[in-house]
């Protein structure tokens, strides 16, 4: 939810810290700050709003120093103002934090009774005060260790000390922290993406670890203060530098590159010569799998919901899709023959990570479907299937969703084939249909203008509904989420058959309703649900591959998607619902890439 960075170097660090913070802004953008050690003092600068605001302050009052820490914030405790911005500093310590300290109230009370005063409303400031207090009586290692031991909750920390002006400390419990290695300089960052422009050599802290960065070396310690070593990963050379190019914003770029990313993902997994799927060495022999459980949050959960329908259709397996923040607290009946699949674009979502940890503790087999292969979820899962979508910067997930659907579809077909749940001819036909998908997505992308014309009808809407049946239902859920998070208009995704059980009462004259009605086995039933809506004054946008003149006179808008195999219609239905949310948000002058109150990677629960 927040982004942290720290650098110790043989040269001034403030420009590098600002540059890294800009790469981390997708994690939170309520406020930003930096502190360095210069002339033997802690120099702290911070402000509400974006990193650009901080840069302007530094332009007026340059911050020198060859070691420092920086932070971009998504507020959890305390309003997003300058006082609550990180870093939080005392005379001798400065701290940046990502996570939630769950016992901060009692610690605040304890240290107030010791005579300390607090400037902010944040949980983080208790860490600053504790370190300050321990420094008076402990050496550095013990000071760090005793502080971490007293904290409850999650943290990734960056810390600098006035009296140790040659080092930066990092620590991790529950929130990710990467270490980068440079030449006469070393780094910490919330993820490798922030450090990528400074190094391609990365290690990762595990929960309970802390590290001490010097410019010539890095020391790692475990939760018992024992020195440990960490594996150094070489980051992929794949050019992951996200750049908008000629697009107005990252989201329009990421929507429009979906035919490319889909093609790339399919090529990564498809053996074109044999028309077979290259997914092997699953942690459980597919023939022995008893049940599949899919766990994720938000848009990633919607891809799991979609996969549930595919797994039911193509395999003899039982399957469940769970929201991670619920799964992690439920009394799950674990079974060693169940396969637990975790879907996450960032691979850092706290609830999904915690659900994965719960499965690991219960010794069951896990698979991670991620976009960031160096992420915490990828490193913890027994088996990883990357979606190869490239960096997704827009907070609203688009190309990653399509990538998740591709990998889940391929995995379903592969498991089905290995279990002989599908005959060879059908398997081949589904693969050949899938190979045509990138062109069909391109064809649908080229119809963006049709949606742009419709968007105007939504900007005054008090609320709207997305209806679908079968494979269209998860896309109805995703469409509603997209409109909500981008345009701040209330939207509900519903199984079309559910309307008569209550939601129909919401329909009033002129209310926009999006009906996903591909010509599949539910078409006639969905049309009847649509008629119920129209009869009550609903203004329908019908998204379909049907070319007949069904109901044309009463439908306000019709968006035509190309015809394809009904099991993969959902990929094509996704494009117009993404464009609709985008253009409505644009007309409402909303921030497309950084919608209010949100962050790209929700690393706190
Ligand atoms: C998607 O548009 C949202 N921004 C959000 O629901 C996101 O899908 C969710 O937070 C899960 O993120 P992850 O895929 O990185 O785990």
Image (spheres, rainbow, N blue to C red):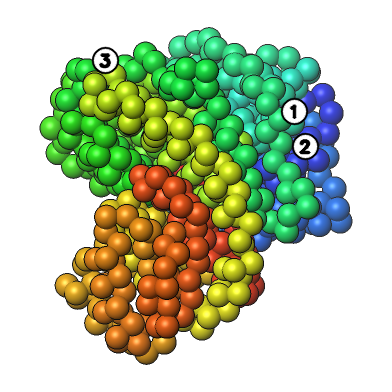
Contact (Cβ within 8 Å) of mark 2 with mark 1: yes
Point out the tag, 2 or 1, that comes first from the N-terminus.
2
Per the image, the residue denoted by label 2 is 16
What crowding class fits label 1: few (fewer than 14 Cα within 10 Å), some (14-19), or many (20 or more)?
some
Residue 418 position in % (x across, y down)? 29, 19
Residue lying at the far front in this picture: please name it.
548
Tell us which disc is closer to us: 3 or 2: 3
Label 1 beta carbon less than 8 Å to ligand 1: no
Residue lying at the far bottom in this picture: please name it.
509
Tell us which disc is closer to us: 1 or 3: 3
Cα distance in 3D space between marks 3 and 2: 48 Å
Point out the tag, 1 or 3, that comes first from the N-terminus.
1
User: What numbered label is drawn on residue 285?
Assistant: 3
Please tell me whether mark 2 sits on a helix, a strand or a loop: helix
Per the image, the residue denoted by label 1 is 198
Q: Is residue 172 above or below residue 586?
A: above
């Amino acid at each position: 939810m927040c982004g942290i960075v720290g650098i110790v170097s043989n040269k001034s660090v403030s420009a590098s810290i600002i540059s890294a913070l800009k790469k981390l802004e997708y994690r939170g953008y309520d406020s930003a700050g930096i502190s360095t050690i210069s002339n033997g003092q802690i120099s702290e600068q911070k402000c509400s709003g974006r990193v650009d605001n901080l840069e302007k302050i530094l332009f007026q009052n340059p911050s020198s120093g060859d070691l420092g820490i920086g932070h971009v914030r998504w507020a959890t405790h305390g309003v997003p103002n300058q006082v609550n911005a990180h870093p939080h500093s005392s005379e001798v310590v400065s701290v940046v934090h990502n996570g939630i300290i769950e016992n901060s109230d009692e610690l605040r009370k304890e240290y107030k009774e010791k005579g300390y005063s607090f400037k902010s409303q944040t949980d983080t400031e208790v860490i600053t005060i504790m370190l300050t207090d321990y420094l008076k009586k402990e050496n550095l290692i013990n000071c760090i260790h005793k502080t971490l031991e007293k904290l409850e909750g999650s943290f990734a920390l960056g810390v600098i000390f006035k009296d140790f002006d040659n080092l930066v400390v990092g620590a991790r419990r529950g929130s990710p922290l990467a270490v980068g290695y440079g030449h006469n300089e070393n780094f910490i960052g919330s993820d490798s993406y922030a450090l990528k422009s400074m190094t391609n050599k990365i290690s990762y802290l595990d929960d309970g670890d802390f590290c001490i960065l010097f410019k010539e070396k890095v020391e790692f310690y475990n939760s018992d203060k024992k020195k440990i070593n960490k594996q150094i990963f070489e980051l992929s050379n794949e050019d992951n530098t996200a750049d908008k190019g000629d697009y107005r914003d990252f989201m329009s770029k990421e929507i429009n590159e979906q035919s490319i990313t889909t093609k790339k993902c399919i090529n990564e997994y498809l053996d074109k010569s044999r028309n077979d799927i290259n997914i092997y060495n699953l942690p459980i022999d597919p023939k022995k799998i008893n049940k599949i459980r899919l766990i994720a949050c938000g848009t990633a959960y919607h891809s799991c919901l979609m996969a549930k329908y595919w797994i039911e259709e193509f395999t003899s397996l039982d399957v469940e899709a769970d929201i991670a923040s619920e799964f992690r607290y439920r009394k799950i009946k674990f079974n060693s023959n169940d396969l637990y699949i975790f879907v996450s674009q960032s691979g850092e979502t706290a609830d999904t990570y915690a659900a994965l940890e719960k499965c690991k503790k219960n010794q069951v087999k896990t698979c991670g479907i991620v976009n960031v292969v160096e992420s915490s979820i990828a490193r913890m899962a027994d088996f990883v299937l990357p979606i190869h979508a490239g960096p997704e910067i827009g907070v609203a997930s688009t190309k990653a969703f399509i990538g998740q659907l591709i990998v889940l579809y391929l995995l379903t077909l592969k498991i089905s084939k290995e279990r002989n749940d599908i005959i060879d001819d059908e398997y081949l036909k589904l693969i050949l249909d899938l190979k045509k998908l990138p062109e069909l997505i391109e064809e649908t992308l080229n119809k963006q203008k049709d949606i742009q014309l419709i968007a105007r009808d939504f900007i005054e809407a008090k609320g709207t509904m997305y209806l679908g049946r079968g494979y269209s239902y998860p896309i109805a859920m995703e469409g509603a989420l997209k409109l909500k998070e981008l345009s701040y208009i209330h939207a509900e995704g519903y199984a079309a058959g559910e309307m008569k059980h209550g939601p129909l009462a919401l329909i009033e004259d002129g209310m926009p309703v999006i009906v996903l009605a591909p010509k599949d086995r539910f078409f006639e039933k969905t049309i009847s649900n649509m008629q119920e809506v129209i009869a009550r004054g609903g203004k329908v946008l019908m998204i379909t591959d049907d070319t007949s003149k069904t109901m044309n006179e009463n439908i306000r808008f019709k968006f035509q998607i190309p015809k394809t195999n009904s099991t993969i219609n959902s990929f094509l239905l996704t494009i117009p619902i993404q464009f609709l949310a985008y253009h409505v948000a644009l007309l409402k002058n909303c921030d497309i890439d950084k919608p209010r109150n949100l962050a790209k990677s929700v690393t706190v629960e």
